[in-house]
Image (cartoon, rainbow, N blue to C red):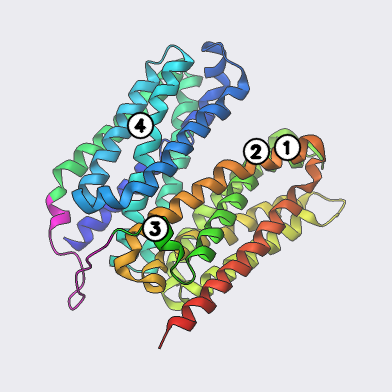
């Protein structure tokens, strides 16, 4: 049953990644048919992120009452419903309304699964779990691309992924009994989680540092992916198709890196993997920043940033129960998710303003500042936790 449950969790994280890149891949066609400006997608994604942040903050209370399995099943089903809603939205206001449940379900399942794996499974499984998210986020744009190329329309793209989500939701509901069985290893005590408010969480030694670290990491990840092509084309003069290809390689590098990280994570431990990952990100950013005449080094730097980023997020989450207590981890993971989404929501637009009013050439400098902060903050967490140890 332990292996079956792990397979279910992997599929749940694939389902979490499936919708994430769908709107962006369809929007160049959608905005014209809905008669709204191209920039309107910013309002849509902000609403989704806002709902996800709120959902993450309240996830611990819902999970405490319903359990991880049921929350996961309901969230996947709600995601399917939202995608079907998107597929029949004939106007932007209707699309806007469907974005609310779409964002809510993402925050709940993210917090639920991350904490469950952090408590019951190894760092290896956590890394592979997040690699599965990369699989999902890679599959859906290809589905949308196929539907658009075959003239099926963006509606069919949403509908197809919606059917995939519905199938996964049915699987989740039909296997709820697996979650109720004892899934911890022999000799491990069951954990009774408690609800921890934000003010209470901030009083726990090291928590303010880890929340800030999550914010910085997601600021780097989202800004690096969103603005890479604009930097390469606008500042370095790289061909648009080449820039797009290497932007995709950033995410591919991150996904492959997480599969590879799973092989060595248990041997080297979370702290060492986090430190190595951040240093790798800094090396990649340095490659982008160096003023070589050839663009090859900068292009390869994007891939290195992705590879370096691979272990950071999953290892920080996996270390949460060990650093702050298993009884606190469900609430803390939800708060961490909210902080992470704040970074990914607000920092790319901030760099957009920098690019517009100053210069897009500051792209690697912007990333470097947050990477240095990330290294300082994660080391501060290590020192704080060390002081608590007897």
**Does the magenta segment cover residue 191?**
yes
- Residue contact between numbered discs 4 and 2, judged by CB atoms under 8 Å: no
Q: Percent position (x, y) of residue 24?
A: 53, 30
Reading the image, the residue beneath label 1 is: 353
Mark 4 is surrounded, within 10 Å at the Cα level, by few (under 14), some (14 to 19) or many (20 or more) other residues, namely some
Q: Nearer the viewer, residue 280 or 319?
A: 319
Give the residues in magenta: 177-194
Reading the image, the residue beneath label 3 is: 333
> What element does badge 3 sit on?
helix
On residue 101, the disc is 4
Reading the image, the residue beneath label 2 is: 349
Pointer 1 or 3: first along the chain:
3
Pointer 4 or 1: first along the chain:
4
Q: Which residue is rendered at x = 31% and y = 31% of the image?
A: 80
For residue 159, which quarter of the picture?
top left
For residue 81, which quarter of the picture?
top left
Task: Classify 50 as above or below 25.
Answer: below
Pointer 4 or 2: first along the chain:
4
| Position of residue 175 in the picture relative to residue 214 (left or right) | left
Give me the C-alpha separation between circle 4 and circle 2.
24 Å
Q: Is residue 311 visible?
A: no
Q: Percent position (x, y) of residue 200?
A: 40, 62
Quadrant of the image containing the N terminus: bottom left
Pointer 3 or 4: first along the chain:
4
Give me the C-alpha separation between circle 4 and circle 1.
30 Å
């Amino acid at each position: 049953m332990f292996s079956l449950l792990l397979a279910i969790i992997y599929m749940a994280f694939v389902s979490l990644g499936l919708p994430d890149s769908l709107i962006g891949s369809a929007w160049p066609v959608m905005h014209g048919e809905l008669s709204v400006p191209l920039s309107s997608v910013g309002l849509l994604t902000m609403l989704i992120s806002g709902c996800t942040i709120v959902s993450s903050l309240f996830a611990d209370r819902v999970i405490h009452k319903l359990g991880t399995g049921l929350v996961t099943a309901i969230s996947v089903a709600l995601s399917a419903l939202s995608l079907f809603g998107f597929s029949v939205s004939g106007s932007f206001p209707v699309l806007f309304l469907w974005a609310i449940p779409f964002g809510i379900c993402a925050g709940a399942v993210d917090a639920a699964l991350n904490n469950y794996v952090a408590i019951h499974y190894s760092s290896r499984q956590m890394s592979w779990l997040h690699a599965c998210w990369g699989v999902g986020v890679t599959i859906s744009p290809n589905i949308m691309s196929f539907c658009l190329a075959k003239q099926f329309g963006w509606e069919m793209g949403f509908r197809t992924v919606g059917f995939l989500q519905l199938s996964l939701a049915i699987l989740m509901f039909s296997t709820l009994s697996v979650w109720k069985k004892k899934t911890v290893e022999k000799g491990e005590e069951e954990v009774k989680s408690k609800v921890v408010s934000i003010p209470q969480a901030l009083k726990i030694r090291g928590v303010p540092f880890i929340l800030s670290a999550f914010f910085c990491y997601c600021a780097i990840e989202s800004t690096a992916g969103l603005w890479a092509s604009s930097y390469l084309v606008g500042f370095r003069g790289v061909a648009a198709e080449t820039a797009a290809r290497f932007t995709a390689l950033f995410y591919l590098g991150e996904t492959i890196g997480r599969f590879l990280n799973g092989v060595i994570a248990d041997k080297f431990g979370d702290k060492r993997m986090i430190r190595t990952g951040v240093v790798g990100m800094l090396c990649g950013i340095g490659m982008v920043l160096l003023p070589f005449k050839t663009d090859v080094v900068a292009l390869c730097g994007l891939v290195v940033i992705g590879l370096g980023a691979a272990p950071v997020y999953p290892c920080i989450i996996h270390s949460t129960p060990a650093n702050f207590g298993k009884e606190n981890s469900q609430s803390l993971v939800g708060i961490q998710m909210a902080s992470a989404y704040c970074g990914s929501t607000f920092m790319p637009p901030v760099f957009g303003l920098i690019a517009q009013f100053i210069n897009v050439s500051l792209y690697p400098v912007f990333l470097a500042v947050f990477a240095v902060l990330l290294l300082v903050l994660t080391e501060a967490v290590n020192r704080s936790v060390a002081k608590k140890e007897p």
